[in-house]
Image (cartoon, rainbow, N blue to C red):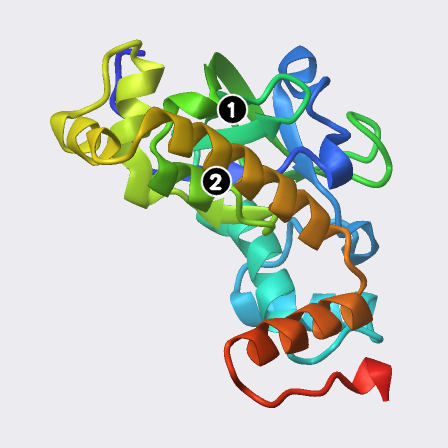
Amino acid sequence: MAEKIKRAWMVRAGNDNVLAGEVEERGAIAIGWKDMGNMATLQTRAQFKSRFQEAYPGESPGRIPNKAGQVFRFAREIEQGDCIVTYDKSTRELIVGIVESPYFYDPMLFDADYPNVRRVRWIKRISRDSFTPNARNSLGSILTVFNLDDHLDEINALTAGKKEPESVKEQAAETPPFYEDVKAKADEFIADLVSKLDPYQFQDLVAALLRAMGFRAVSSAGT
């Protein structure tokens, strides 16, 4: 790619990776939150938060800023020329592309459940194992939309088909290859399991972790 990537974002390919096989064919990426409707007229975080509260009145107040913020990032913070990375679990590859359109609403391009769309020119697939453990940990976040600027050097190098930057090579050399491979697979497996927990199961998990750390914790789900 001729121009160096200056900003990068992860956008998940739908729940359970449902869109991963279609994004390249359709030249786009999409997210859900369909009950928010067409958000083309929304501009500020406050407007997105208000629309989210109207669309999902039963959502926990503590989660609203996070979820509304992800939609805001997709529609307003991501700009044309930015890099989009999405993950194909079936091949363990990251698909890298360049954003080519503003946000638009189209419930027909992918699926009615994923009507919020950005056009993307997909340029390369990169094995997840090509990234350093630090980058893989970031890529494993269960958020739908998040920033990857901390890993721009790796993304630029790998997208250009070059070896990783010296700083990245040094970091990778410190960790035994076998450990990296096992840890990468474990991180991905754990992220998949956690993403499928319902709120009460997640509450139980957090309580168990706190108890393992020596704290006293009781889950209200179990009382």
Residue 6 in sight here: no
Residue where numbered disc 2 is placed: 139
Q: Is residue 99 visible?
A: yes
Q: Is residue 19 left or right of residue 157?
A: right
The foreground one among 186 and 31 is 186
Residue 30, relative to residue 177: is it above or below? Answer: below
Image x and y of residue 214, in percent: 51, 83
Q: Earlier in the sequence, mark 2 or mark 1?
A: 1
In the image, residue 25 sits, relative to residue 174, either above or below, namely: above
Q: Quadrant of residue 56?
A: bottom right
Q: Residue at x 25, y 23 (%)?
A: 4
Residue type at mark 1: give it: Leu
Residue drawn at the location 40% of the way across and 33% of the way down: 179
Q: How many marks?
A: 2
The amino acid on which the numbered mark 2 sits, given as a three-letter code, is Leu
Task: Determine whether the residue tagged by mark 2 lies in a helix, strand or loop.
Answer: helix
Say which residue label 1 marks.
94
Measuring 75% from the left and 41% from the top, which residue is drawn there?
15
Question: In the displayed structure, does residue 1 sit left or right of residue 116?
Answer: left
Badge 1 density bin: few <14, some 14–19, many ≥20, Cα 10 Å: many
Q: CA distance from mark 2 to mark 1?
A: 9 Å
Q: Residue 201: horizontal and vertical position, in percent?
A: 79, 67
Marks 2 & 1, CB-CB < 8 Å contact: yes
Quarter location, residue 136: top left
Q: Position of residue 159 (x, y in %)?
A: 35, 17
- The quarter of the image holding the N terminus is top left
- Quadrant of res 49: bottom right
Residue 129 screen position, x and y as percent: 44, 23
Q: In front: 68, or 212?
A: 212
Q: Is residue 99 above or below residue 138?
A: above
